[in-house]
Image (cartoon, rainbow, N blue to C red):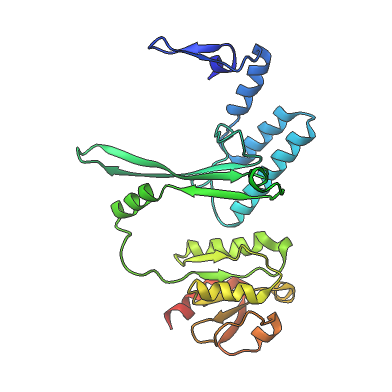
Amino acid sequence: MRALLGTGRKDDSGDFTKGAGLSDAQAEVVMGFVSAKRDTGAETCARLRELVGASVIGAEGVDELETIAALLAAQGYGADRIVLDPGVVRGLGYYTGPVYEAELTFEILDEKGRKRQFGSVAGGGRYDDLVKRFTGQAVPATGVSIGVDRLLAALRAKGRLGGEAAGPVVVTVMDRDRMADYMGMVGELRAAGIRAEMYLGNPKNFGNQLKYADKRGSPIAVIQGGNEAETGVVILKDLILGAKIAVSATLEEWKDRPAQVEVARADLVAAVQRMLTQ
């Protein structure tokens, strides 16, 4: 890689690949970023701050990574699941922010009995300018592509295919500035073996959140607005027993319907488990 940043390199076959034409000093700066990965995300971000120096744009980029790391940590993902790696490079022609890849790390045996890993099964990132190329309109966007064939092969190897999966518990979003709290709820439920997800659409219309939960076949909706947060409770709505969700329902109207219970925030997981086994 170092050679490709400079004049270029010749491989074993004799083919020459022209390099980027950077000076030695410029190439060393790039290599510093590529090799900035450390044992923890915090250490990696600290190293990146050293490298960006007084650059305002660089500091904003590190801020974004720290925010992402904090949100992931709130969901219970440690260094064994999520790694900040500045050496990951994807589509420099259109990505404009964080990029990511998902890899399967478990081993299987191939037809010859050799240990193998599936490796990458998904990748994506932020591309604010891609839609504009086709429509002329600036549209901020984040996306991911999934290697379906490889993922299905992995699921088959793990015996995860077959049967109809129950819908996830949906954690609704009442306050945008408390996203980490909602992600924390999702993380706790998942850690207990309960399928769960947070609503990722526009949270302004509460009825749309409940309609989404209904479409997902969710057995329970978790609700915590500002008042509930202040008193340390959450509302669990049993969507199976409750009436059919209406898009126009307001938060207060939904609270007044039957088949719901208010529990202490600390008892969230236990209460959900009880409702799922009833």
Is residue 58 or residue 4 the one in the foreground? 4
Q: Which residue lies furthest to the left in this view?
A: 112
Quarter of the rendering occupied by the C terminus = bottom left
Is residue 151 or residue 46 the one in the foreground? 151
- In the image, residue 68 sits, relative to residue 14, either above or below, namely below
Query: Residue 101: percent from the left, percent from the top?
Result: 51, 42
Toward which corner of the image does residue 176 lie, by quadrant?
A: bottom right
Q: Residue furthest top?
A: 14
Can residue 233 be seen in this snapshot?
no
- In the image, residue 157 sits, relative to residue 261, either above or below, namely above
Query: How many numbered marks are there?
Result: 0
Is residue 96 or residue 130 the one in the foreground? 130
Residue visible at 56% across and 16% down in the picture: 19
Toward which corner of the image does residue 134 lie, by quadrant?
A: top right
- In the image, residue 93 sits, relative to residue 105, either above or below, namely above
Residue visible at 49% across and 69% down in the picture: 168
Looking at the image, residue 90 sits to the left or right of residue 177; the answer is left
Query: Residue 12: percent from the left, percent from the top?
Result: 39, 12
Query: Residue 68: percent from the left, percent from the top?
Result: 64, 48
Residue visible at 62% across and 72% down in the picture: 209
Residue visible at 54% across and 52% down in the picture: 77
Can residue 61 be seen in this snapshot?
yes
Query: Residue 70: percent from the left, percent from the top?
Result: 65, 50
